[in-house]
Amino acid sequence: MIMQANCFLECWTSYARKKSGCTPWYFPVRDNDIQMCDPWETKSFMEYMETIPDGECDYCLPDCISVLYGTSVSSAPFRPCDHTTLGTSSMCELDNPEGLVNPPIWAQEVSQQYQKDTGDVPDYATSGHFNNQRKVVPDAKRPNLVFTTGVDEYPTYDAYKRDIALVRLGDCRCCSNPEPDPLFFHQVLL
């Protein structure tokens, strides 16, 4: 089976070979009768490869089993979990039996609210959850710090703002459907 990328390479090489009359030494050849290009001819050969006329390689069909992935990068802060977002995604679920999102994004806020209202946080609100507050510098390394003002002022930070990300992998393009499939994606919490 010839892959489309290989077919394009062969087509481009064949076109450039016909136009220049030679092949650079680092390109594969099928027979020994091919003339090798000198450095100036190699430059011409590469220019021919980059300027192939439209339709020259139309016989190179798409692969039937390949998948192409597009990439893009964007970012946005996590939305807080409240009465409007609770239960709308795995990030804002109160019941998380598989521990998919640990620490839950709402855990710190719930603990602070209980502490403020009652002075105590019930076990069911913290049971099995990690804390999303992280120390800027581990206690063992604090004695070695030279500059401590920033660490003293802000000894912890919210991991959801600096460490944790939700990565969405997708934009699958298959040969049978060259349009992106909006239903094909994976989410990974890092």
Image: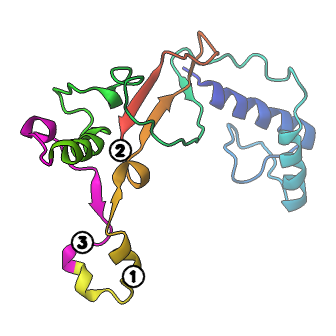
- Check disc 1 and report the residue beneath it: 149
Residue toward you, 86 or 160: 86
The part of the image, by quadrant, that contains residue 101 is top left
CA–CA distance in space, label 2 to label 3: 21 Å
CA–CA distance in space, label 3 to label 1: 15 Å
Q: In the displayed structure, does residue 160 sit left or right of residue 36? A: left
Q: Nearer the viewer, mark 2 or mark 3?
A: 3
- Check disc 2 and report the residue beneath it: 190
Q: Position of residue 144 (x, y in %)?
A: 27, 88
Q: Position of residue 4 (x, y in %)?
A: 64, 24
* Numbered-mark total: 3
Q: Amino acid at mark 1?
A: Thr
- Looking at the image, tell me whether mark 1 or mark 2 is earlier in sequence order: 1
Question: Which structural element holds mark 3?
Answer: loop
Residue toward you, 172 or 75: 75
Q: In the displayed structure, does residue 184 sit left or right of residue 124? A: right
- What's drawn in magenta, residue-wise? 119-140
Q: Amino acid at mark 3?
A: Pro
Residue 133 belongs to magenta span: yes
CA–CA distance in space, label 1 to label 2: 30 Å
**Relative to 37, residue 141 above or below:** below
Residue toward you, 107 or 97: 107
Dot label at residue 138: 3
Q: Nearer the viewer, mark 3 or mark 1?
A: 1
Q: Position of residue 127 (x, y in %)?
A: 10, 39
The structure residue drawn at horizontal position 37% and vertical position 29%, both measured from the top left corner, is: 82
Q: Nearer the viewer, mark 1 or mark 2?
A: 1
The structure residue drawn at horizontal position 75% and vertical position 16%, both measured from the top left corner, is: 59
Q: Position of residue 143 (x, y in %)?
A: 23, 86
